Amino acid sequence: MNRGTEGRHSAGGKAAGNVTAGLEITQSKYLPVEAREPQMHAIVTVQVDGTENAGGAGQVLAQVLAVDCSSSMTWPPEKFHAAKQAAVAALRMLPDGTPFAVIRGTESATVIYPANGSMARADARQRAEAERAVHRQEAIGGTCIGAWLDLSRRLLADQDAPIGHLLLLTDGKNQHDERMPLSDALDVCAGQFVCDAWGIGDGWDGRELLRITSRLHGSTSSVKEEAALPREYEMLMDRLLAKTVPELAISVTSMPGATVRYLKQVFPTEVELAPDDAGRDGGTRRFVTRAWGDESRRYQLCLSADPAGRPHREDLQLAVVALDVPGHEDVELPSPQPCLVHWTDDPALSRQSDIQVEHFERHQRLGEAVAAATDAHRRGERDLAERHLGRAVQLAHAIGADQSLARMEQLAEILDAAAGRVRIRSDVAPIDFEHLITATSISTYSPVSAPTRTGTAGPAGATVNCPHCQGKAPATARFCPTCRHPFGERP
């Protein structure tokens, strides 16, 4: 299989001093004519630049802190102390004028600051009072995360700030889900605010937190050492306060014979994206993404395609991808970019795979293998857990996910990474697998750094310009993936 990128189309804004958005599509355009239900996969890269220098952004953030105060937070004592210190660290970083509230999370949800049950505007006095309210809390009760989300939604809905954000901390499983089902709460909250979630201690469920943050466009993290939590909160707040573009919409317009099956974020974390019903105009599907600073994100686009009545052996436009930033006319937008298809009866062409699509699909399978290993270990099926974890190691090795490999090496002795042979360590606890689930939810950035067929690794993210068409290609490529121009021997 040829692992080079077959086609790459990109555009970006160029106005100096303005916020600019860039758009790039990479894909392998060839599909077999005789395939049953053929699908085209492409990676859509969106980049935003210039938000730090935009100026005049005004107040864009409204912040809710939800702190788990269930009885499980009492042991070890350092855990609840670290949770309070983390909340205080976040409070101290809020700029003056930021609407904020602190929620006590148990089997219900209560606003502990401000006392009127709404949201306060940050200043020195309000922050100090909120800190005292946090330190007064005691840990008693159960856990109903759905109630925490629903109260956060109601608080944030009353604010004018473009970006509503919830920072959620928990140490336990969702024991009292019947009081406010999490699935119902997520359906109501989706699209209303962004949520980042943190696990602390040894009782939380990694997949449950990922389910929350995937629906609410955030990320899931965890700490093994309670003392590390306040600093982690500070770094997260730093990143959050740099976001000044509330939302960015990706529109996909399919041509006759094509249908948009899905668009999902695959980097830096996996995020579910549902099409905006208000944007459904003919063959156009509009997907809204939340809270942007200067950053790059990647999305996997899947289109179903029908070759019936379509020309063969030539490039055809399958869909057009465009960006829009509602309410920000000053953002320099890129030109819409095409997603192509080339119907062929040549197996050598149709077997080609885009390197980025392959990379992120392997990363998804890595997460699935870790989840399966977690389940098997929890059931006491050690041999099965080793097989699944070995598969995860094999995938991480293949895509060059060194950080994930390092995490897995803490759980198992890696005997042969390429073959997926591991031996789980005798002192591994179930919570160690939950930490692994959150760690492997972060995608690796550079698929061209993955091992090549010969087992050597190319420069991380390195590309070269083709002298014939000026398109970009991996530095390890022997020919241009766009025009097939040969590069010849290179040192």
Image (spheres, rainbow, N blue to C red):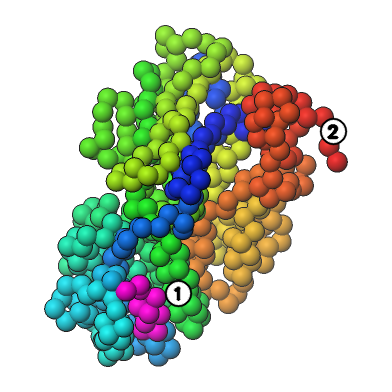
Residue 203 lies in quadrant? bottom left
Span colored in magenta: 84-96
| Viewer-nearest of discs 1 and 2 | 1
Kindly indicate the quadrant of the structure image that contains residue 129: bottom left
Is 310 rendered above or below residue 172?
above
The reply to whether the C-beta atoms of the residues labelled 1 and 2 are less than 8 Å apart is: no
Main SS type for the magenta part?
helix
- Identified at 55% across, 65% down, the residue is 382
With 33 as the anchor, is 306 left or right in this view? left
- Please determine whether, in this image, residue 422 is positioned above or below residue 102: above
Q: Which mark is residue 234?
A: 1
Local crowd at mark 2 within 10 Å, few (<14), some, or many (≥20)? few
Question: Sequence order check: which comes first, mark 1 or mark 2?
Answer: 1
Q: Nearer the viewer, residue 139 or 190?
A: 190
Label 2 SS: loop
Residue drawn 77% across the image and 47% down it: 456
Residue labelled with disc 2: 489
Left-right relation of 110 to 475: left
Percent across and percent down for residue 159 are 20, 62
The residue located at (44%, 51%) in the rendering is: 270
Q: Is residue 91 magenta?
A: yes
Q: Residue at x 15, y 76 (%)?
A: 117
- Extreme residue toward the left, this view: 116
Q: Is residue 143 visible?
A: no
Q: Residue 429's spot in the image, x, y percent?
A: 51, 74
User: Which residue is more in the foreground, 209 or 279?
Assistant: 279
